[in-house]
């Protein structure tokens, strides 16, 4: 079995390399814009759209890029169009074909053309042109680099590695995970529970909102195109990158802690409240996460990280509909309105931690296909963890 992961690195390039990188990103932007124009031209006239093969032949040796880079971008464009077409067929009329003209676009470098030179990765720009030399980070994960994408000060490496055969756990023990409002996640196997705090993430987000508002205010007092405006734009970009990095890091740590819980408790299945129902069931979701401190985006990311991290240990992550899992009383089955951190049953007086109730109900629902009140109660022993040690720097960095 193979596993493919995309790693993001921030790269700082010396001026010569930066110039080459900018030129390549510019050329990729030109190519993308040409593709958008051609596609739009054909669409408006109801002509047949050119195939990828035709486009590849057409744009051969037209851009100062490696031939495989040109091909990869055309393939990416093709994939984007296919995606939109499927969406539109399904009735999503808002789905829009690529329309934006791009000044810059991230060039893609295919694995076969990539070369290593000591600590450097050489991104080829085609025959007769010097490659871009990017210093690789020291701790590069094991595996084969199959693709590199060059962003603005960032490098995205797609790395595949062979996985050991999944450790097959003999037991059929299952766990339930509720990605909650107060806690980022609460996982339980019915006997013990682990709660991961979302507070670190929340404070980062709040810090960002404040800082962004401050930047926006300053920005509104500047002239478009002025040096001051550009400087503020850069600051905004840096800020959002930083916040993105911090939240990704926190989510990885949270996922690792949940995985560790599953491994030590010998679980083979982890049920999780499905995020796919988020759109169909917005009313229910919205009422549950009114003060949405940690956004849906974060939960999606956490689920994604969990999926592949659990797979490494042979544990399956199964999403199930989380309808009523937060309201149903795990002892008597009464539906309660939930307010605040504690779940309180109006019928039988049962009290428990709110996200614990969700996790328990998800667990029984996953095992039996329906919520079974009275079978499992919220464990007495709940361990509380933060995804990453919360340092004062978190807030200082973004505030
Ligand atoms: Zn009850």
Image: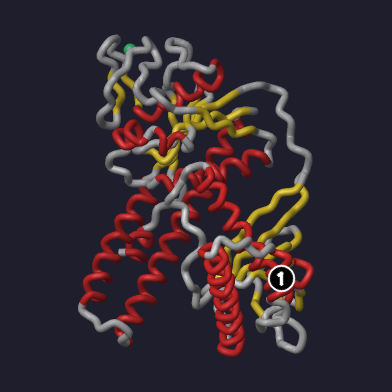
Q: Residue at x 50, y 20 (%)?
A: 365
Q: Residues within 10 Å of mark 1 (few under 14, many from 20)?
A: some
In the image, what residue occupies the spot 49% across and 55% down? 248
- Residue at position x 34%, y 31% in the image: 284
Instruction: Name the spot of residue 356 as percent of width and height, x first.
Output: 41, 27
Residue 229 visible in the current orientation:
yes
Q: Nearer the viewer, residue 187 or 229?
A: 229
| Residue linked to disc 1 | 56
Please tell me in which quadrant of the rendered image residue 136 appears.
bottom right
Query: In this rendering, does residue 357 appear at all?
Result: no
Q: How is the image coloured?
A: secondary structure
Q: Is residue 157 above or below residue 378?
A: below
Classify the position of the N terminus by image quarter.
top right
Dividing the picture into quarters, in which one does residue 135 lie? Answer: bottom right
Mark count = 1
Question: Between 193 and 54, which is closer to the camera in this rendering?
Answer: 54
* Foreground of the two, 182 or 321: 321
Which quadrant of the picture is home to ligand 1?
A: top left
Q: Position of residue 61 (x, y in %)?
A: 72, 81
Pointer 1 residue Cβ closer than 8 Å to ligand 1 = no
Quarter occupied by residue 82:
bottom right
Q: Is residue 117 left or right of residue 393?
A: right
Instruction: Say which element carries label 1.
Output: helix
Quadrant (top left/top right/bottom left/bottom right) for the C terminus: bottom left
């Amino acid at each position: 079995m193979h596993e493919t992961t995309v790693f993001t690195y921030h790269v700082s390039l010396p001026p010569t390399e930066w110039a080459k990188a900018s030129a390549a990103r510019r050329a990729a932007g030109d190519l993308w814009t040409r593709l958008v124009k051609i596609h739009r031209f054909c669409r408006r006239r109801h002509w047949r759209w050119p195939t990828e093969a035709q486009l590849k032949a057409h744009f051969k040796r037209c851009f100062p890029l490696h031939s495989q880079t040109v091909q990869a971008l055309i393939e990416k464009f093709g994939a984007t169009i296919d995606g939109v077409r499927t969406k539109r067929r399904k009735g999503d009329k808002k789905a829009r074909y690529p329309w934006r003209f791009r000044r810059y676009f991230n060039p893609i470098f295919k694995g076969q053309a990539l070369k290593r030179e000591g600590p450097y990765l050489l991104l080829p720009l085609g025959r007769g042109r010097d490659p871009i030399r990017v210093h690789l980070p020291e701790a590069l994960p094991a595996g084969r680099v199959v693709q590199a994408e060059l962003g603005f000060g960032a490098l995205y490496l797609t790395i595949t590695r062979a996985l050991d055969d999944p450790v097959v756990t003999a037991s059929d023990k299952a766990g339930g995970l509720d990605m909650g409002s107060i806690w980022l996640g609460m996982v339980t196997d019915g006997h013990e529970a682990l709660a991961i705090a979302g507070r670190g993430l929340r404070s980062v987000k709040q810090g960002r909102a404040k800082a962004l508002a401050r930047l926006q205010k300053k920005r509104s007092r500047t002239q478009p195109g002025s040096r001051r405006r550009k400087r503020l734009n850069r600051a905004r970009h840096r800020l959002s990158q930083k916040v993105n990095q911090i939240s990704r890091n926190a989510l990885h740590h949270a996922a690792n802690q949940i995985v560790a819980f599953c491994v030590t408790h010998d679980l083979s299945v982890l049920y999780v409240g499905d995020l796919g129902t988020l759109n169909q069931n917005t009313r229910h979701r919205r009422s549950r996460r009114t003060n949405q401190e940690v956004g849906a985006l974060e939960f999606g990311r956490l689920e994604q990280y969990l999926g592949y991290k659990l797979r490494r240990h042979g544990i399956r992550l199964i999403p199930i509909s989380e309808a009523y899992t937060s309201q149903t009383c795990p002892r008597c089955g009464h539906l309660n309105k939930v307010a605040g951190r504690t779940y309180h049953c109006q019928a039988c007086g049962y009290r428990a931690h709110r996200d614990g109730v969700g996790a328990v109900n998800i667990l029984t629902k996953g095992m039996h296909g329906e919520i079974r009140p009275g079978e499992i109660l919220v464990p007495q022993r709940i361990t509380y963890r933060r995804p990453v040690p919360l340092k004062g720097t978190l807030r200082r960095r973004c505030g």
